C-alpha cells in the first residue's frame, strides 16, 4: 500500500445534481510527481502561475489549504483567493463624491391644487396632518384648495468615510471656479483692447508710424499665448532645498550630498564642544571656538554665524519696526508692501536721529558739559597703539620701536604766582624752594632778584635761619614725644609678656593646627574646582562652585599662601 497524500478529485454527483459525499479518489504516483514538479517550476518562475476563477494569478507560495476550496463545500470550484478578499455584500456603502445637501429654494411651479396624500392642513406633500407645524386652519387646504404650502426640503442622508468627512472641498461647485476663470479672461481681454486702442490713438495723433504700430498689435496674441510659458520660465527659481526642477523635461532630480561634505557633528569630536541637536540637525555655536582657529578661515562657523550676518539683522529690525508701527495704527506689512515699509523705516530713523540730536543739544545748553564730551581718543588716553614690536628671550627689542615711557599723571611745568621756575628747582640746607627768587615758602609770590638779594644779605639770612630754627625745634619736640610713647608701650608689653607666655604658646599651637587644616581644605577645594571646570556646564550640580559661609582668618591665610600669582616669574615651577 502507498502512503501518498490524498488529493481532491471530482466527487460523484447524483442525477438530481446533489453533490455526493463520497471520499475523493487517490492520485497515482505519476500524477503526484507531475503535480509536485509543476509546483516547483511555478515557485521558481519557470512555469506560468495558476489562475483562479476571476482570472487573477495565484501566488505559488500560498499554501494549498488557503487557496483550495474544500471538496465538501463546492468541489466544482477551482482554487481561488476570493474568500480571502473583502466581500462586497459585507462592505459599508458610502455616498458618492458628488452628493451633497440641497441648498437654496426649490425652483418649481407653485402648487394651486390639493394633491392626494398631502397634508390636510397646509397641503404640503412632505408631511402629514399630525406632523404639520403650521397653525391649524379652521378649514384645511384639503377642502378649500387654496393657500397650498410649498414642500419642505427633503435633505438626503450622507454617509461618508474618514477621508470624506475631512475633505475641505466637500460641497464645492466646480462651476464657481469656472466663473472666476471667465472673469479673469474678461479682464485680460479688456486690457488687450485698451492697449490696442491706445496704440491706435497714438498713431492717429501722429506720434507713431504705421510700421511701428503694426508689430505690437501682432504681438498681442503672442504675448497672450506665451503667458503659460512665462510661468514655466520662473519654475527653476523656486527649487526646494536639495532638489533641481527641470521645466523642459518636467522631472525632479534629487541632489545627493557629495563625499567632500562633512557632517556638523564630525567637525570637532570633543564632547564638550558645540552642542549638536540631532532632531533639528542644528549646531548653533562655532565648533572651532576652543581650537584657536580663526573663524574667517574655517569652512563652517555654526548656524548663528549665518543667522547674524549679511542682511539678516537689518531684515529683523525692519520686521520689528513693522510690528511696532502696526500696533500704533500704521497699515504696513513686510511681505505685502516692502517698498512702503522701507521708506517709512528710513524716514523714521532720520527723525529719530534728529530728535536725539535736539535732545542732546537742549541738555548741553541747559546743564553744560560740552568739554567732557570732547575728550581725546581712548588710544591716546591709555597710550595703546597697534605698532608691531618683536622681543628676544631676554626682553631686548629685535624689531619695532620701544614702548614710550608713560608720563606722570600730575601736571608738569606749571608756573604759578609769577614764578619762572617750578617748586623744587632750588634746594638749600635740607629745604626746597623756587630757583627764580630763592623763596623757601610754597605757594608764595615771586620776588625775583630782590628776593635773592634779601636772602643773601646777613639780615635776611638771619631771618630765614630763625624760621628754620623754629621749624627744627618744633619737629624735634614732636619726635621726642613719639619716642616716649613708644617706650611706654614697650614696657607694658614686656610686663604682660611674662604673664601670658604660657597662654601665647597654646594659642600659637592652636593657630598652627587651624592653619594646617585650612591648607588641606584649600587643596581639596582647588582639586574640586578643577574637576568641576572640566565637566560640561549642563552636567554640573547646582551651587557646585559657591560657598555660603564667610571665610575665617585661617582660610583667608591658606588662600593667600596657595594662590598662584600670574606675575610671579617662578609660577610655572610650582607644580614640579
Image (spheres, grey):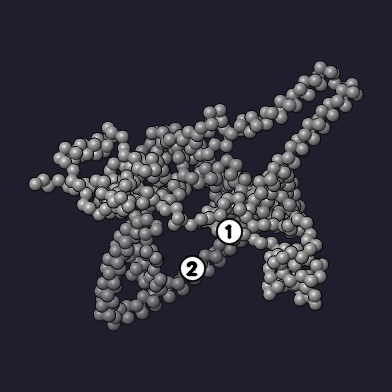
Residue 502 visible in the picture: yes
Q: Relative to the observer, which residue lies in front, 182 or 392?
A: 182
Q: Are marks 1 and 2 in contact (CB under 8 Å)?
A: no
Q: What residue did someone put label 2 on?
A: 476
Question: Residue lying farthest top?
Answer: 211
Look at 29% across and 82% down and name the residue there.
499
Task: Please determine whether, in this image, residue 267 is positioned above or below residue 398.
Answer: below
Q: Position of residue 288 (x, y in %)?
A: 41, 43
Look at 33% across and 47% down and name the residue there.
77
Look at 52% across and 43% down and name the residue there.
306
Q: What residue did someone put label 1 on?
A: 158
Asked whether, in this view, residue 313 is left or right of residue 504, the answer is right
Task: Please determine whether, in this image, residue 210 is positioned above or below residue 306.
Answer: above
Q: Relative to the observer, which residue lies in front, 72 or 147?
A: 72
Q: Quadrant of residue 100?
A: bottom right
Asked whether, in this view, residue 575 is left or right of residue 540, the answer is left
Residue 368 visible in the picture: no
Amino acid at each position: 500500500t502507498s502512503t501518498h497524500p490524498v488529493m481532491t478529485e471530482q466527487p460523484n454527483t447524483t442525477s438530481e445534481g446533489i453533490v455526493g459525499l463520497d471520499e475523493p479518489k487517490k492520485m497515482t504516483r505519476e500524477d503526484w510527481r507531475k503535480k509536485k514538479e509543476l509546483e516547483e517550476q511555478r515557485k521558481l518562475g519557470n512555469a506560468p502561475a495558476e489562475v483562479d476563477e476571476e482570472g487573477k494569478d495565484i501566488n505559488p507560495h500560498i499554501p494549498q489549504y488557503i487557496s483550495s476550496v474544500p471538496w465538501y463545500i463546492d468541489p466544482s470550484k477551482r482554487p481561488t483567493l476570493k474568500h480571502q478578499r473583502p466581500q462586497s455584500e459585507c462592505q459599508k456603502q458610502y455616498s458618492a463624491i458628488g452628493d451633497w445637501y440641497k441648498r437654496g429654494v426649490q425652483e418649481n411651479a407653485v402648487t394651486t391644487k390639493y394633491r392626494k396624500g398631502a397634508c390636510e392642513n397646509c397641503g404640503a406633500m412632505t408631511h402629514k396632518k399630525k406632523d404639520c407645524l403650521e397653525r391649524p386652519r379652521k378649514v384645511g387646504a384639503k377642502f378649500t384648495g387654496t393657500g397650498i404650502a410649498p414642500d419642505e426640503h427633503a435633505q438626503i442622508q450622507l454617509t461618508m468615510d474618514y477621508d470624506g468627512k475631512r475633505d475641505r472641498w466637500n460641497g464645492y461647485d466646480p462651476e464657481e471656479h469656472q466663473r472666476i476663470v471667465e472673469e479673469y479672461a474678461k479682464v485680460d481681454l479688456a486690457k488687450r483692447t485698451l492697449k490696442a486702442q491706445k496704440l491706435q490713438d497714438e498713431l492717429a495723433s501722429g506720434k507713431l508710424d504705421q510700421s511701428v504700430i503694426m508689430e505690437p498689435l501682432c504681438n498681442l496674441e503672442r504675448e497672450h499665448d506665451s503667458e503659460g510659458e512665462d510661468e514655466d520660465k520662473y519654475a527653476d527659481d523656486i527649487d526646494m532645498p536639495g532638489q533641481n526642477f527641470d521645466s523642459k523635461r518636467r522631472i525632479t532630480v534629487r541632489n545627493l550630498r557629495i563625499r567632500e561634505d562633512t557632517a556638523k557633528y564630525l567637525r570637532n569630536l570633543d564632547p564638550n564642544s558645540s552642542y549638536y541637536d540631532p532632531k533639528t540637525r542644528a549646531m548653533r555655536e562655532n565648533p572651532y571656538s576652543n581650537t584657536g582657529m580663526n573663524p574667517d578661515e574655517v569652512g563652517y562657523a555654526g548656524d548663528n554665524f549665518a543667522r547674524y550676518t549679511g542682511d539678516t539683522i537689518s531684515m529683523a529690525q525692519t520686521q520689528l519696526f513693522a510690528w511696532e508701527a502696526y500696533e500704533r495704527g500704521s497699515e504696513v506689512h513686510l511681505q505685502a508692501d516692502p517698498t512702503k515699509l522701507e521708506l517709512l523705516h528710513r524716514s523714521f530713523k532720520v527723525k529719530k536721529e534728529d530728535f536725539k540730536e535736539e535732545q542732546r543739544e537742549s541738555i548741553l545748553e541747559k546743564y553744560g558739559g560740552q568739554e567732557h564730551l570732547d575728550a581725546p581718543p581712548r588710544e591716546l588716553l591709555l597710550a595703546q597703539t597697534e605698532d608691531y614690536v618683536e622681543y628676544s628671550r631676554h626682553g631686548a627689542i629685535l624689531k619695532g620701536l620701544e614702548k614710550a615711557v608713560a608720563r606722570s599723571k600730575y601736571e608738569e611745568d606749571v608756573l604759578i604766582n609769577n614764578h619762572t621756575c617750578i617748586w623744587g628747582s632750588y634746594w638749600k640746607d635740607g629745604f626746597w624752594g623756587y630757583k627764580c627768587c630763592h623763596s623757601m615758602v610754597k605757594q608764595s609770590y615771586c620776588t625775583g632778584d630782590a628776593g635773592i638779594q634779601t636772602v643773601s644779605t646777613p639780615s635776611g639770612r638771619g631771618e630765614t635761619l630763625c624760621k628754620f630754627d623754629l621749624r627744627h625745634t618744633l619737629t624735634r619736640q614732636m619726635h621726642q614725644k613719639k619716642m616716649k610713647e613708644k617706650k611706654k608701650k614697650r614696657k607694658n608689653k614686656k610686663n604682660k609678656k611674662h604673664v601670658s607666655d604660657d597662654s601665647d604658646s597654646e594659642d600659637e599651637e592652636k593657630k598652627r593646627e587651624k592653619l594646617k587644616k585650612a591648607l588641606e581644605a584649600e587643596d581639596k577645594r582647588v582639586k574640586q574646582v578643577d574637576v568641576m571646570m572640566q565637566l560640561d556646564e549642563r552636567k554640573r550640580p547646582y551651587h557646585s562652585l559657591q560657598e555660603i559661609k564667610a571665610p575665617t582668618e585661617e582660610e583667608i591665610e591658606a588662600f593667600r599662601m596657595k594662590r598662584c600669582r600670574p606675575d610671579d616669574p617662578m609660577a610655572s615651577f610650582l607644580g614640579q
